Amino acid sequence: MRTDNFQAPDYYNIDELLTDEHKIVRDAAREWVKREVSPIIEDAAQKAEFPKSIISGLAEIGAFGPYIPEEYGGAGLDQISYGLIMQEIERGDSGVRSTASVQSSLVMFPIYKYGTEEQRKKYLPKLASGEFMGCFGLTEPDHGSNPGGMTTNFKDKGDHYLLNGAKMWISNAPFADIAVVWAKDENGRIHGLIVERGMEGFSTPETHNKWSLRASATGELIFDNVKVPKENLMPNKSGLGAPLGCLDSARYGIAWGAIGAAMDCYDTALRYAKERVQFDKPIAGTQLQQKKLAEMITEITKAQLMAWRLGVLKNERKATSAQISMAKRNNVEMAIKIAREARQILGGMGITGEYSIMRHMMNLESVITYEGTHDIHLLITGMDITGIPAFQ
Ligand SMILES: Cc1cc2nc3c(=O)[nH]c(=O)nc-3n(C[C@H](O)[C@H](O)[C@H](O)COP(=O)(O)OP(=O)(O)OC[C@H]3O[C@@H](n4cnc5c(N)ncnc54)[C@H](O)[C@@H]3O)c2cc1C
């Protein structure tokens, strides 16, 4: 079992920008990750198992629906607290953060925003407590970056909808109790439906042999003439903008989460470099390793400021989708570069499970691809500043 000696870097005293509530929420999540995630996560990742034992703890630190109002079981926190919780969880592992992101932003958020009052009351408190786990089905085998091309569809059969199609790469799918599924009606319009485990014709086979996000369960969603009750359609928003609204919220959380992974890699590499002696002196005393470490803390500091400012804009309901794309793209790339450099600082030890760096590095290969690839976020920024879409 690994001892977690993590010390969070705060080179620009960014703590001074946080409220007391932010720091209380952040510190509780940090302590929980040290106590409950760090001791077990390496083993879970090596075995490619999602550690279900941490679900109740995630609920207790407010990771399921941090910004959902308390009347529905959420924590009723602001967007910066949400971001800080994601940062701390991803400091432990991106796969665990993925589970929390999906539950909060991709399942609870659409039910809260687009669902009926009955749907809110039925599902949100159970999702907030972890009694129910959810997943989000948007991506299909032939439609990833272009989800608008989806072929999953439903037909109105009078007293129910008949759902057919398939989704792939779905986080939490193998154990989820409910799935928020995006499908086209007979007119080709996209709607969100809540599909429950146990509905006939609905299956969730697990995706095996991943080298990334191994402590997160990924699977397919298969719909073979699934009869979905009409009251399971979320009526308050339709069209591609509905799932994209959920992605905005999740991508914002990732912009913070990636900082956590980067901080863990930096902190580990800094400590190792000060202790590891070669040629009769610590490798931290060499110019080459100092360059790596100095650049890491500079990039982390820039990412922290970007995330904090985006959080302020989110709290003021002013953050645009393009601003969120820029932060997700920048911060994940920053984290992946830091993970690669940090791994080298540890030499051979860097490839082992004794340290968290290689796990973060492999996890971040998924984080840079899901919720909009690195390329797609660049195209979003390009479109925003030129006014010309370059997707096709
Ligand atoms: C571990 C994991 C978990 C996931 N969890 C979920 C989930 O819970 N729910 C869900 O719905 N999805 C999920 N996804 C799916 C993820 O969102 C998609 O993988 C992602 O959107 C990319 O789609 P794709 O893999 O089909 O790649 P593609 O869209 O086929 O892209 C392949 C490459 O082509 C590039 N490309 C595509 N279009 C363009 C263009 N117009 N111009 C230039 N380059 C382009 C991309 O940037 C990429 O490099 C998950 C994926 C992974 C790996």
Image (cartoon, grey):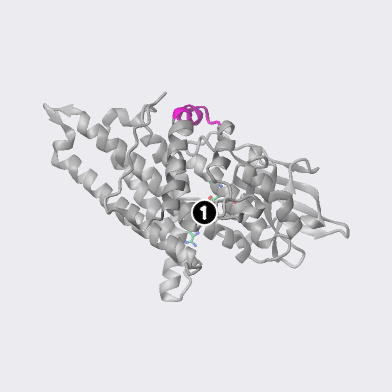
In percent of width and height, residue 165 lies at 71, 51
**Could you tell me which secondary element the residue under label 1 belongs to?**
loop
User: How busy is the neighbourhood of tag 1: few (under 14 within 10 Å), some, or many (20 plus)?
Assistant: many
Kind of residue at badge 1: Glu
The reply to whether the magenta stretch includes residue 158 is: no
Residue at the extreme top: 1
In this rendering, is residue 382 above or below 112?
Answer: below
Which residue is most to the left?
280
Residue at 20% of width from left, 33% of height from top?
274
Q: Residue furthest front?
A: 20
Of residues 259 and 208, the one nearer the viewer is 259
Residue 25, percent from left and from top: 46, 47
Most foreground residue, 275 or 179:
275
Residue 274 as seen in the image, left or right of residue 203: left
Please name the residue that numbered disc 1 is placed on.
371
- Name the quarter where the N terminus is drawn: top left
- Highlighted magenta segment, given as a residue range: 39-49
Magenta residues, dominant SS class:
helix
Most distant residue in the right direction: 158
Residue 43 on the magenta span: yes
Image position of 313 (left or right of 229): left
Residue 362, quarter of picture:
top left
Task: Say whether residue 166 is visible.
Answer: no
Q: Is mark 1 within 8 Å of ligand 1?
A: yes
Q: Is residue 187 left or right of residue 251?
A: right
